[in-house]
């Protein structure tokens, strides 16, 4: 469940959160829609649906880059060795 701050430059947090929610990998709650009750309802809905959590997990695995840290290190090492 992602609740992006609307107070960041160019609304980047919401844009990034929408990428995940549009792919079914997260739930997006805008700050102005997020009440304690709404958040609790979303949490309970997830906890009550193992299938939904599995679907979200599968969707996230499809878009994740699992070796991103290693890739970044390789790029940094390559750039550093060019000097």
Image (cartoon, rainbow, N blue to C red):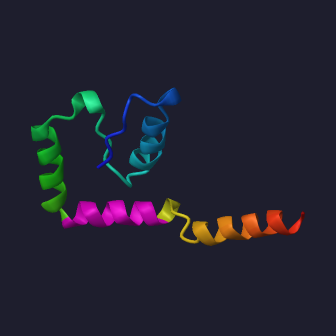
The question of residue 11 being in magenta is answered with no
Q: Position of residue 40 (x, y in %)?
A: 12, 47
Prevailing secondary structure class for the magenta stretch in the rendered image = helix
Identify whether 67 is placed above or below 83. below
**Is residue 61 found left or right of 35 in the rendered image?**
right
The question of residue 56 being in magenta is answered with yes
Q: Position of residue 55 (x, y in %)?
A: 33, 62
**Is residue 58 found left or right of 42 in the rendered image?**
right
Q: Position of residue 41 (x, y in %)?
A: 12, 46
Q: Which quadrant would residue 59 be assigned to in this image?
A: bottom left
Q: Residue at x 42, y 43 (%)?
A: 17
Please state which of residues 79 and 47 is positioned toward the viewer in this rendering.
79
The number of numbered badges drawn on the structure is 0
Question: Which quarter shows the C terminus?
Answer: bottom right
Q: Residue at x 29, y 49 (%)?
A: 1
Q: Residue at x 31, y 47 (%)?
A: 27
- The stretch of residues the image draws in magenta is 50-61
């Amino acid at each position: 469940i992602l609740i992006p701050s609307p107070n960041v430059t160019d609304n980047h947090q919401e844009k990034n959160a929408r990428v995940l929610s549009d792919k079914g990998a997260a739930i997006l709650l805008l700050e102005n829609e997020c009440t304690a009750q709404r958040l609790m309802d979303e949490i309970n809905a997830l906890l009550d649906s193992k299938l939904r959590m599995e679907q979200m997990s599968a969707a996230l695995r499809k878009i994740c880059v699992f070796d991103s840290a290693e890739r970044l290190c390789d790029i940094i090492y390559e750039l550093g060795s060019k000097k």
